[in-house]
Image (spheres, rainbow, N blue to C red):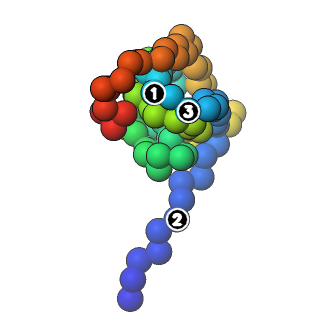
Amino acid sequence: MGSLRTAPAFKAVIRFTLDGAGCRRVTLSCGCNRPRSLGQGIANEHVPLLDGEDGLMHYGKHEVIVDGPEAFLLATDGDDALTEMVLDNLDIHVVGAGVDPRR
């Protein structure tokens, strides 16, 4: 008998999109007191940004290069009443030709 996989139930989310074509470098700083991840809906990518949990705020920086439109989802599965999450310093810059967007 096969196993049943379910999608994670996100409790706190921050969404943002990049419209239009073109290669861009997206850099963001974020913090949360629960495990969190960054998903890219169009590229179907999912990157864990914090796996552990101790109730304290943890901050970090993440950078990705995308080519074309993209829908981002910064998410955590924490209890709404106890979860604290912040998105800070979202920078988006056009990058030149020859940059591998899969980096």
In the rendering, at what x and y percent does residue 76 appear?
55, 38
Question: Nearer the observer, disc 2 or disc 3?
Answer: 3
Q: Quadrant of residue 99?
A: top left
User: Label 1 crowding class (10 Å Cα cut-off): few <14, some 14-19, many 20+?
Assistant: many
Q: Is residue 6 above or below residue 98?
A: below
Identified at 40% across, 39% down, the residue is 47
- Total marks shown come to 3
Residue furthest toward the front? 97
Q: Amino acid at mark 1?
A: Cys
* Nearer to us in this view, 40 or 51: 40
Q: Earlier in the sequence, mark 2 or mark 3?
A: 2
Residue 71 visible in rendering:
yes
As measured in the structure, the alpha-carbon distance from the residue carrying label 1 to the one carrying label 2 is 33 Å
Tag 1's secondary structure?
strand
| Residue pointed to by mark 1 | 23
| Residue pointed to by mark 3 | 21
Q: Amino acid at mark 2?
A: Thr
Looking at the image, residue 49 sits to the left or right of residue 81; the answer is left
Q: Tell me whether the residue at label 1 lies in contact with that at label 2, contact meaning CB atoms closer than 8 angstroms.
A: no
Question: Nearer the observer, disc 1 or disc 2?
Answer: 1
| Residue pointed to by mark 2 | 6
As measured in the structure, the alpha-carbon distance from the residue carrying label 2 to the one carrying label 3 is 32 Å
Which quadrant would the N terminus be assigned to in this image?
Answer: bottom left
Q: Quadrant of residue 79?
A: top right
Identified at 37% across, 33% down, the residue is 101
